Image: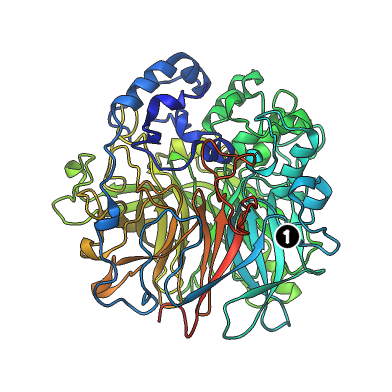
């Protein structure tokens, strides 16, 4: 049962939470933040109310009223007016950050700094494959959508095309569909078969060739044979310990090795061997009838991954039985993996890597050890994007081969199938000084140490060892959250994108927010997650022993209105920073600065893209580079010398609006329906930010 949303409102806005629209929560994550957290383990609990033996669905049915009372009585006061609280343009900025900061705003356009230009590279419905028809909002078909750019683009990456100068593969995730904004007259939870199959075709991944003109930031799509659309129906190969196990076999795939489709693809990463990685995230809200799964173990595992009947907004199970858990309960276990796509071969079968575990992967990003006896070792980092979930890494035992020869590609294709999967535990230097207010501890920094707990090792011959007592390797690969619970992992505030710095090797993770932190029965604030009912999020910086099991860490940013006492910008003068809320994706520019995109800005402004200095006297300086149109989310930033690329996801997706009553007309203007799109931004003269 969903918690009644209207009981949390205050003049139309929910305080104590991000500003993401309720309709976005419904379609994107099955209203996860309005349900009880899936993690009911006692890891790092200080005020826990035990719920041993009680399922999540039972808790929701029996205690909905109590949950409302807790939420309504403990929300935070709204932040002050952030528009007058900072002056980010005063003083010098490091190289790469010399631009006029964009102020907070609510415009229905992409706002960029003075002296910069922008271009829509590709929009939802634009042709990708040869023969694709032009987009016609009123006459969509599943066949057309399978040849066109998908909906709600999230991650973006650029991979050079072999042997063709200034041509790249633009690889993009299509994370989720918002059917009310795709079709006029849409009846929620009652799609027609055509509408459901159009939505299936709008999911997945796009590989699009683009051409660049040297010295100019624009990118031009090339509709040709190199392009590819991967949808919710494309065959994938499952590898690792889960493959062939009893947990993934279905009536359509009794071998348990071939999975149709990828869904809920959030952020991702690029590999040094020329492929794309994508994380399957909120896959739980595509399945119906979770309550009809009567086997207790299977039901408990569904609870741990937040499956709930009420979360299924898409209703695909009406037309494909694999999405109906009463008919195919194992289909749920076939999603939640890191997927790998080779854009250089449009005919290749994409892979789902179970050795990296099954969770709500926000992303998977790669660090390659460059020095010493471990040189060539590949480490993959991933966050599990839900409240109170964990941070993971995978250390491969297969060393990377350089080059793009067939032999090198064949070798590197197995890198993520052998090695050890770990989960992180964090310890703070000032644990007794954290009271949930966000106040700095006596040491003057939020910092500490940590360790990686092994969960699963896959050997070169494909055999595997579980490091969790009572769980087989197959169980650890498929029910990774349960294994991490038993390992004692530290509960974090929604670990989203996590990326290693290309120069220093330090690892940066966006912890977006957590409205349940410190509330009754939930984990208390700690040094790494220092605020109760955290609505603005933080950025954690990890100095990792990449191939080992120890690390140190500190908080780079504790986000929010810099005029408020519970924010921290690495000690930088808070009168000279841009307000930032709900960090989501992270990236790096050629100068070594960190860039952050946001999702659900709780400071009465559109979401945006921010640059943050990491070193020297400017460490912590934060400047807003752009804002996206109203109702939109900033995703998938790529920061280069010639251009910045962002994915503008769900423009106009606001409550009480739909395709019948659009809140935005971006990017086409006039009376056009809003369309998610990829945008390039560049400077009139000279490199970005210099």
- x, y (%) of residue 399? 59, 68
Q: At 62% across and 30% down in the image, what residue appears?
A: 312
Can you say whether 58 is above or below 10 in the image?
above
Q: Please state if 282 lies on the left or on the right of 207 as rendered.
A: left
- x, y (%) of residue 156? 59, 62
Q: At 26% across and 37% down in the image, what residue appears?
A: 77
Whether residue 270 is visible, yes or no, is no
**Residue farthest front in this picture:** 670
398 or 688: which is nearer to us?
688
Q: Please state if 556 lies on the left or on the right of 461 as rendered.
A: left
Q: At 79% across and 59% down in the image, what residue appears?
A: 134
The secondary structure type at the circle numbered 1 is loop
Q: Please state if 244 lies on the left or on the right of 452 as rendered.
A: right
- x, y (%) of residue 55? 50, 21
Q: Quadrant of residue 677?
A: bottom right
Can you say whether 543 is above or below 195 in the image?
below
10 Å crowding of disc 1: few (<14), some (14-19), many (20+): many
186 or 54: which is nearer to us?
186
- x, y (%) of residue 633? 50, 52
């Amino acid at each position: 049962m969903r918690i009644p949303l209207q009981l949390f409102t205050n003049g139309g806005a929910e305080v104590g939470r991000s500003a993401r629209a309720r309709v976005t929560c419904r379609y994107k994550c099955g209203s996860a933040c309005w349900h009880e957290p899936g993690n009911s383990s006692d890891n790092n609990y200080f005020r826990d109310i035990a719920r041993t033996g009680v399922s999540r669905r039972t808790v929701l049915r029996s205690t909905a009223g109590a949950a409302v009372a807790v939420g309504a009585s403990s929300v935070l006061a709204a932040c002050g007016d952030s528009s007058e609280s900072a002056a980010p343009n005063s003083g010098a900025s490091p190289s790469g950050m010399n631009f006029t900061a964009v102020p907070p705003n609510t415009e229905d356009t992409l706002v960029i700094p003075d002296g910069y230009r922008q271009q829509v590279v590709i929009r939802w419905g634009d042709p990708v494959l040869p023969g694709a028809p032009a987009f016609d909002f009123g006459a969509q078909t599943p066949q057309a959508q399978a040849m066109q750019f998908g909906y709600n683009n999230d991650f973006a990456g650029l991979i050079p095309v072999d042997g063709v100068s200034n041509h790249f593969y633009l690889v993009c995730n299509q994370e989720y569909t918002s059917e009310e904004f795709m079709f006029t007259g849409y009846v929620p939870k009652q799609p027609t078969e055509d509408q459901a199959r159009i939505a299936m075709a709008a999911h997945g991944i796009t590989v699009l060739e683009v051409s660049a003109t040297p010295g100019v930031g624009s990118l031009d799509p090339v509709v040709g044979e190199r392009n590819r659309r991967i949808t919710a129906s494309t065959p994938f190969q499952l590898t690792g310990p889960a493959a062939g196990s009893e947990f993934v076999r279905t009536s359509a795939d009794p071998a348990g090795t071939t999975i149709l489709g990828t869904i809920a693809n959030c952020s991702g990463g690029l590999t040094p061997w020329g492929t794309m990685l994508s994380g399957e995230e909120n896959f739980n809200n595509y399945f119906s009838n979770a309550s009809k799964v009567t086997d207790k173990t299977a039901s408990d595992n569904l609870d741990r991954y937040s499956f709930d009947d009420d979360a299924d907004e898409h209703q695909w199970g009406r037309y494909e039985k694999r999405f109906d858990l009463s008919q195919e309960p194992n289909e749920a276990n076939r999603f939640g993996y890191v997927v790998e796509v080779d854009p250089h071969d449009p005919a290749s079968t994409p892979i789902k890597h179970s050795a990296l575990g099954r969770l709500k992967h926000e992303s998977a990003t790669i660090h390659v050890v460059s020095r010493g006896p471990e040189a060539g070792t590949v480490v993959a980092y991933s966050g599990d994007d839900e409240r109170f979930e964990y941070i993971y890494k995978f250390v491969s035992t297969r060393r990377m081969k350089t080059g793009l020869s067939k032999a090198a590609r064949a070798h590197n294709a197995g890198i993520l199938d052998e090695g050890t999967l770990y989960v992180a535990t964090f310890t703070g230097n000032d644990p007794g000084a954290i009271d949930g207010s966000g106040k700095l501890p006596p040491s003057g920094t939020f910092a500490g140490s940590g360790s990686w707990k092994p969960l699963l090792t896959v050997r070169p011959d494909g055999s595997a060892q579980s490091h969790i007592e009572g769980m087989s390797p197959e169980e650890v690969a498929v029910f990774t959250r349960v294994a991490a619970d038993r390992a004692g992992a530290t509960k974090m505030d929604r670990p989203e994108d996590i990326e290693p710095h290309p120069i220093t090797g330090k690892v940066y993770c966006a912890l977006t927010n957590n409205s349940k932190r410190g509330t009754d029965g939930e984990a208390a604030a700690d040094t790494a997650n220092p605020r109760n009912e955290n609505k603005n999020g933080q950025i954690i910086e990890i100095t990792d022993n990449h191939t080992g099991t120890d690390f140190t860490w500190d908080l780079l940013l504790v986000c929010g209105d810099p005029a408020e006492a519970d924010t921290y910008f690495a000690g930088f003068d808070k009168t000279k920073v841009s307000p930032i809320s709900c960090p989501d994706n992270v990236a790096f520019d050629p100068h070594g600065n960190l860039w952050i995109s946001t999702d659900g800005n709780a400071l009465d402004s559109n979401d945006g893209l921010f640059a943050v200095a990491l070193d020297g006297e400017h460490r912590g300086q934060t400047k807003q580079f752009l804002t996206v149109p109203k109702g939109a989310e900033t995703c998938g930033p790529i920061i280069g010398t010639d251009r910045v690329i962002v994915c503008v996801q769900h423009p106009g997706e606001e409550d009480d609006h739909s395709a019948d009553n659009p809140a935005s007309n971006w990017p086409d203007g006039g009376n056009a329906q809003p369309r998610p799109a990829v945008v390039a931004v560049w400077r009139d003269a000279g490199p970005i930010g210099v």
